[in-house]
Amino acid sequence: QVQLVQSGGGSVQSGGSLRLSCAVFGYTYSNLCMGWFRQAPGKEREGVVVIDSAGRTTYADSVKGRFTISQDNAKSMLYLQMNSLKPEDTAMYYCAADPRWGFLRELRTDFVYWGQGSQVTVSS
């Protein structure tokens, strides 16, 4: 059973930075595709960035140059550094994992395992 436990998030003014963390339990981390997703009130969940088992990343256009995904395979940790935050980045953010794919270069949202969510609020 894969378990994802998130930490981080919070409230920040426009232009500020936040970092999200996601700890993975119960699976060999290096075999997983991982991703960060977000869902704003009244909107569908959308992909922010995914990273496949080879470390290839795919970002949403809306966050390119501002957000950075990273991971520590030895610690089974996934991170999302968010800089230059905008009010439109306000959402619940989720990390997700899936062992089914090796190669992933699309922001698909049908991941199998999900974290509990972290609220990110950006005020203008």
Image (tube, helix red, strand yellow):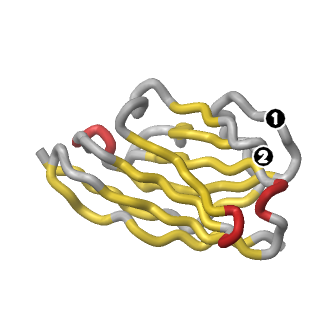
In primary-sequence order, the first of circles 1 and 2 is 2
Q: Secondary structure at mark 1?
A: loop
Mark 1 nearby-residue class (10 Å; few <14, some 14–19, many ≥20): few
Asked where in the image residue 75 lies, by quadrant, the reply is: bottom right
**Type of amino acid under label 1:** Phe
Give the amino acid at mark 2. Answer: Ser
Q: Residue 114: image x %, image y %?
A: 66, 60
The crowding category of the residue bearing disc 2, from other C-alpha atoms within 10 Å (few below 14, some 14 to 19, many at least 20), is some
Pick whichever, 90 or 106, lies toward us. 106
State the image coordinates of residue 51 (x, y, percent, origin top left): 66, 42
Question: Looking at the picture, how far across and down is residue 104, in whole percent?
Answer: 75, 34
Kindly report the distance in space between the C-alpha atoms of the residues bearing marks 1 and 2: 7 Å
Residue 91 falls left or right of residue 7: left
> In the rendered image of this protein, does residue 83 appear above or below residue 77?
above
Quadrant (top left, top right, bottom left, bottom right) of the C terminus:
top left
Q: Secondary structure at mark 2?
A: loop
Residue 80, percent from left and from top: 47, 53
- Name the image quarter holding residue 52: top right
Q: Are the residues tagged 1 and 2 within 8 Å (C-beta)?
A: yes
Direction from residue 82 to residue 115 in the image, left or right? right
Residue underneath mark 2:
53
Q: Dot 1 corresponds to which residue? A: 103
